Image: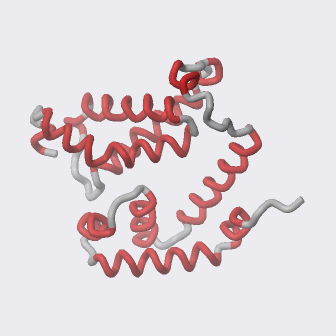
Amino acid sequence: MERAQGGDGEAFAQLYTAYSDTVYRYVYYRVGGMPTAEDLTSEVFVRAFQRLDTFAWRGRDFGAWLVTIARNLVADHFASARFRLEVTTGELLHSNEVERSSEEMAVENFRNRGLAEALNRLPRRMRQVTWLWTLGVPTAHIAQQLGISPNTVRVHLFHARQRLAADPLVVLIASPARS
C-alpha cells in the first residue's frame, strides 16, 4: 500500500490483482449485468487510484475501502436516469444471457436486504468475520486482519450460520415461494 501511495504503478497493479475479483463480485450481484459490473469495477479502481493518498489504515482492509467506493458507485448508477435508458454495446453482445424479470429482481433485492439485516443483527466480531468471508476474503486473511486465530474465524462463521439459520427473516426469505 505504501509503495502504491508513493506512485509505484506495479504496487497498485498488485492491489488490483488482489482485490479486483472481490470488487467485481460485489458490483455484479448488485447490478445484475456483466458489462455494467465490468464498467463499474473499472471505475472503482480509477477512483481508488485517484484518491490513493486519502486512504489511511484505520483497522479496515484496503478491500473494504474499495467496496465502499463500489457501494457508492452502484448507488449513483441506480440513482441516475441514464441507467434506465442506456443499452451498452456489451449488453448487446451478451444478449443471449437470460434476462431476469423485474419481479425476480425485486425478490432477489428483498432477499439480499433481508439477509443484510440479519447479518447486521449478529454480534460485532461475528458480523465482521461473516461480511469479510462473504466478500471472498480467505479465512487466514480474515484472522490476520482482525488479529484473531483462523480457528476463531471458523468458530465465528459456524455460530453465524447457526444464528442465521434460526433467524425468522432468513427462514422466510430462504423458503420457496408458495402458490
Q: In which quadrant of the rendered image does the N terminus lie?
A: top left
Q: Who's the residue at 48% across and 41% down the image? A: 27
- Looking at the picture, does residue 119 appear above or below residue 21? below
| Residue 113 horizontal side relative to residue 53, left or right | right
Residue 100 spot, x, y in % from top left = 69, 39
The image quarter in which residue 15 lies: top left
Q: Who's the residue at 54% across and 65% down the image? A: 119
Q: Tell which of 165 and 126 is nearer to you.
A: 165
Q: Residue furthest front?
A: 96
Counting the numbered discs, the total is 0
Q: Who's the residue at 38% across and 77% down the image? A: 154
Residue 45 spot, x, y in % from top left = 32, 34
| Residue 20 horizontal side relative to residue 12, left or right | right
The image quarter in which residue 133 lies: bottom left
Residue 5 spot, x, y in % from top left = 15, 37
Residue 44 spot, x, y in % from top left = 37, 34
Q: Who's the residue at 31% across and 66% down the image? A: 142
Q: In which quadrant of the rendered image does the C terminus lie?
A: bottom right
Q: Residue furthest right?
A: 179
- Looking at the picture, does residue 156 appear above or below residue 32? below
